[in-house]
């Protein structure tokens, strides 16, 4: 790949000291200017992948280039080209937002004037102008995330890594962050590598999605293409009388593949698609089964995950094993 | 289960949890053990020449320092448990404890029992090492028991102070607020020399410091020449009683805060 | 618009990290006040409580205050260990260290920056202790120049112990582990000639330990300026030990930092 703000990963592996592979041979490409959503449950290997691509962790095997630079041999050049907002906002609670800008910009070699100008501009862009001179210890979670994003951009990186940027944020803050990320790619041509465990985030933001499970990439493509692979919609019904659940399940099983649900409803993936809906209703009526709720779901990325792994994405994860940083390991 | 049985069950459980964490991580006991040993070595060893000063009438400088170290460790042992209470507040575990216990004072008593058991372990080790390194014991068994009794009351009083502070401040970050007053009380007693050899401002402060009476009574028991022991016990017990009210009121404040 | 960045150097980076270290120090009274108050309190206790010790034959001065004045400087250095180590350990624990590692920051810049905060506290301490000692009636036998040398030696000691703290913080990444050092450092401080001159320590084992303990030479270097005047041997030993500790601790910190900042 010749482009100077893309990502190319070949057979990337990260093994823990006692055996388990957090990342088990990943191959992927991110085109310049693309928003790539890296989706998976907790413990899938998303953060470990990000740590490797951002040079914080050496891979055990495999290779990758970020912005055209090898992540192992050209780490410094990679860091110059990327901005990173990791899973923890990792801010100094005693410094103000503006002071963070000063520190980060200064360490990147920007002049005082550049720091002041660009810092103010970025703080305004993320809606933190008024809070810029308050200590970060008084910021809300959403404000910290926005500051984190602004800091990642201070040195005008070509590629932006965002590791679960909206975890723990309220709906409004999340939407605001989505707008900003989307704008970065569309307006400024920044390539965005975004990890998330939220389906709707990947759906809303990503041009292409890679789904990772237990260290392996199990699916990759545009959200639409991935869902089209699954193709079939899901029908979910809640019986009015909970005693009729078994009969409801038996009826629905005649129209497709039963799906596991745990909330007192019954669900099935329809064999012949939405055309069957009328037949389902007629059959339920003839059997005398009344339903309190009947919903038709188009295929989701969770359905994609389920189809590929046999598990639902939501609730599928373990805590991502964190390598104990004893300070004793050496670079690969 | 009777109310008394339930109360004791809570006390036992809380105390067990605290002691269990020390057994699992013995390093937690290190500060409690290391400080008294170190103070004993530093003062008895490093300042032993002070024992030869004119006017120093005590029978043995090692024993002179041992008594102070014993009582100091009793006091700090009570306060260290306060750190556990603070840590539990920070982690939210206190809420779990308060929800589980019918009579919540049992939670405090449980911590107090753990404090005493840990302190007793430390005293045994320090006493053993002091004897092994040549300390002479002037008192008999009853007098030594009296000295231990004094240490127990000091431990309880210090713990109640810490419990009262922690239930009010409800964070480990308040640890200095517990340690500092205690430190000042301990350090303004006659540590290095008897009261008659003190000069300057510290002599005046030591005169009015209640801990002075406790240390002097302890030293007299150690020497086998009890002096104002009952007064010392009464003073220590009186403080403990007042501090128990302080602790209970703190508990009520913690309950009200949720 | 792409920001045009100059190639960062130690000279350009260290000031930013030093500035951060200073700001963090100033904004945390708990980091400034105890290192000032606690040693002064102990000085007051010891100066008064052990004043009778000057009656021991061959005691080098008739003022225990003057004798003990070196002690708070050493105690302050222990706080420097704690502060420096805790700050860097907290950065590691919070992930802020990764933030710094993702910039072109060099390891040396980080170490220089972190030590700046330590030196700020060390300066405040030196001024406070000297002022308190003089106000309480102690006099500096080596005069005004000696007071300046005392100041410089105390900063060297603060830097040395700050470097120990940095090593501990970088090696363990744990603020609790760093704070666990505090009692050990305290023990090291007391098992020295802090409370009595080495030749007047009656206990043989204690005198031996105090002779081996490098802290004794740091204290004796400081003390010589206060109660003796110009004792070049004591000064040479004091400065020598401080510099040696600093060099070893900084080397250890550099290695620990290299291992900690695993970036490729």
Image (cartoon, coloured by chain):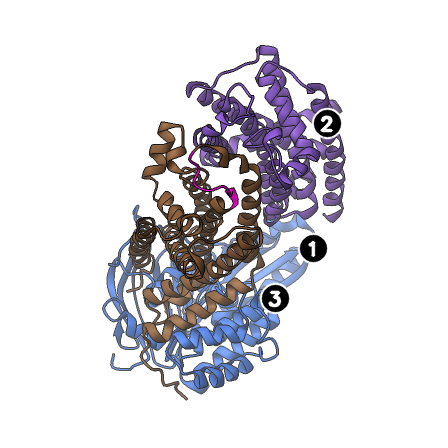
* Residue at 46% across, 39% down: C195
| Image height of A250 relative to C6, above or below | above
Q: Which residues are magenta?
A: C58-65
* Residue at 60% across, 75% down: A131
Which hue belongs to chain B? purple
Where is residue A291 shown, x and y percent of the image?
67, 58
Which image quarter is the N terminus of chain B in?
Answer: top right
Q: Spatial distance from mark 3 to mark 1, Cα to Cα?
A: 49 Å
Query: Few, some or many C-alpha atoms within 10 Å of disc 3 (few <14, some 14-19, many ≥20)?
Result: few
Where is residue C237 shown, x and y percent of the image?
31, 49
Mark 1 residue element: loop
Mark 3, chain letter? A
Which mark is nearer the camera, 3 or 1? 3
Write down the residue under mark 2: B235
Q: Are marks 2 and 1 on the same chain?
A: no
Mark 3 residue element: helix
Nearest the camera: A161 or C76? C76
Where is residue B161 shown, x and y percent of the image?
68, 37
Res. A282 image quadrant: bottom right
Nearest the camera: A277 or B245? B245
Write down the residue under mark 1: A240
Predominant secondary structure, magenta span = loop
């Amino acid at each position: 790949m010749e482009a100077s703000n893309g990502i190319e990963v070949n057979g990337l592996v990260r093994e823990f000291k006692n055996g388990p592979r957090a990342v088990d041979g990943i191959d992927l490409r991110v085109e310049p200017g693309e928003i790539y959503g890296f989706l998976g449950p907790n413990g899938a290997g998303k953060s470990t992948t990000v740590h490797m691509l951002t040079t914080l962790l050496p891979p055990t095997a495999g290779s990758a280039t970020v912005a055209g630079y090898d992540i192992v041999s050209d780490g410094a050049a990679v860091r110059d080209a990327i901005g990173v907002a990791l899973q923890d906002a990792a801010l100094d609670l005693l410094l103000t937002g503006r002071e963070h800008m000063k520190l980060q910009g200064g360490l990147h070699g920007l002049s005082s004037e550049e720091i002041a100008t660009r810092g103010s501009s970025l703080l305004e862009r993320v809606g933190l102008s008024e809070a810029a001179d308050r200590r970060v210890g008084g910021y809300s979670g959403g404000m910290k995330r926005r500051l984190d994003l602004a800091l990642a951009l201070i040195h005008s990186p070509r590629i932006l890594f965002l590791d679960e940027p909206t975890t723990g944020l309220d709906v409004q803050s999340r939407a605001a962050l989505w707008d900003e990320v989307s704008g970065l790619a569309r307006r400024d041509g920044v390539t965005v590598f975004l990890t998330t465990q939220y389906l709707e985030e990947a759906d809303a933001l990503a041009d292409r999605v890679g789904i990772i499970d237990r260290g392996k990439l199990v699916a990759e493509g545009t959200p639409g293409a991935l869902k089209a692979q699954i193709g079939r919609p899901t029908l979910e019904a809640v019986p009015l009388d909970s005693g009729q659940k078994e009969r409801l399940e038996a009826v629905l099983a005649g129209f497709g593949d039963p799906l596991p649900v745990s909330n007192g409803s019954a669900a099935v993936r329809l064999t012949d698609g939405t055309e069957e809906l009328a037949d389902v209703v007629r059959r339920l009526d003839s059997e005398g089964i009344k339903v309190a709720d009947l919903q038709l779901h188009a295929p989701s990325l969770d359905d994609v995950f389920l189809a590929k792994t046999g598990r639902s994405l939501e609730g599928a994860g373990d805590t991502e094993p964190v390598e104990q940083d004893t300070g004793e390991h050496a670079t690969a | 289960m009777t109310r008394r049985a339930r109360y004791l069950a809570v006390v036992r459980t809380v105390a067990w949890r605290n002691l269990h964490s020390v057994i699992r991580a013995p390093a937690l006991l290190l500060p409690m053990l290391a400080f008294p040993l170190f103070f004993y070595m530093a003062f008895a060893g490093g300042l032993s020449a002070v024992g030869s000063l004119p006017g120093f009438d005590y029978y043995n400088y090692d024993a002179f320092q041992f008594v102070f170290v014993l009582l100091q460790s009793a006091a700090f042992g009570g306060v260290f448990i306060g750190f556990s209470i603070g840590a539990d507040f920070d982690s939210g575990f206190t809420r779990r404890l308060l929800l589980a216990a019918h009579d919540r004072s049992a939670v405090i008593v449980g911590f107090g029992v753990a404090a005493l058991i840990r302190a007793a372990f430390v005293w045994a080790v320090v006493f053993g090492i002091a004897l092994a390194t040549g300390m002479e014991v002037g008192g008999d068994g009853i007098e030594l028991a009296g000295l231990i009794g004094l240490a127990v009351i000091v431990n309880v009083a210090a713990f109640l102070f810490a419990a009262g502070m922690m239930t009010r401040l409800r964070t480990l970050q308040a640890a200095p607020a517990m340690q500092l007053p205690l430190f000042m009380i301990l350090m303004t007693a006659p540590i290095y020399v008897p009261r008659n050899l003190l000069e300057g401002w510290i002599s005046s402060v030591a005169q009015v410091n209640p801990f002075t009476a406790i240390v002097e009574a302890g030293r007299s028991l150690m020497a086998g020449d009890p002096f104002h022991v009952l007064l010392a016990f009464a003073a220590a017990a009186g403080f403990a009683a007042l501090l128990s009210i302080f602790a209970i009121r703190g508990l009520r404040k913690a309950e009200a805060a949720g | 618009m792409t920001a045009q960045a100059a190639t960062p150097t130690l000279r350009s980076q260290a000031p930013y990290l030093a500035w951060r270290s200073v700001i963090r120090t100033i904004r945390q009274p708990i980091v400034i006040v105890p290192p000032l108050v606690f040693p002064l309190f102990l000085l007051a206790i010891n100066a008064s409580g052990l004043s009778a010790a000057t009656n021991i034959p061959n005691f080098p001065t008739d003022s225990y205050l003057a004798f003990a004045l070196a002690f708070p400087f050493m105690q302050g250095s222990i706080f420097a260990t704690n502060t420096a180590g805790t700050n860097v350990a907290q950065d590691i624990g919070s992930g802020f260290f990764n933030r710094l590692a993702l910039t072109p920051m060099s390891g040396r810049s980080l170490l220089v920056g972190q030590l700046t905060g330590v030196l700020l506290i060390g300066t405040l301490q030196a001024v406070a202790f000297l002022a308190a000692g003089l106000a309480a009636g102690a006099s500096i036998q080596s005069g005004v120049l000696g007071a300046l040398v005392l100041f410089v030696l105390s900063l060297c000691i603060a830097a040395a112990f700050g470097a120990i703290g940095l090593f501990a913080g970088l090696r363990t990444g744990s603020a609790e582990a760093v704070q666990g050092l505090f009692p050990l450092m305290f023990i090291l401080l007391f098992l020295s000639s802090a409370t009595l001159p080495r030749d007047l320590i009656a206990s043989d084992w204690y005198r031996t330990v105090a002779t081996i303990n490098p802290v004794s030479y740091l204290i004796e270097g400081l003390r010589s300026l206060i109660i003796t005047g110009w004792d070049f041997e004591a000064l040479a030993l004091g400065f020598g030990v401080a510099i040696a500790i600093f060099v070893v601790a900084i080397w250890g910190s550099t290695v620990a930092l290299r291992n900690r900042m695993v970036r490729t």
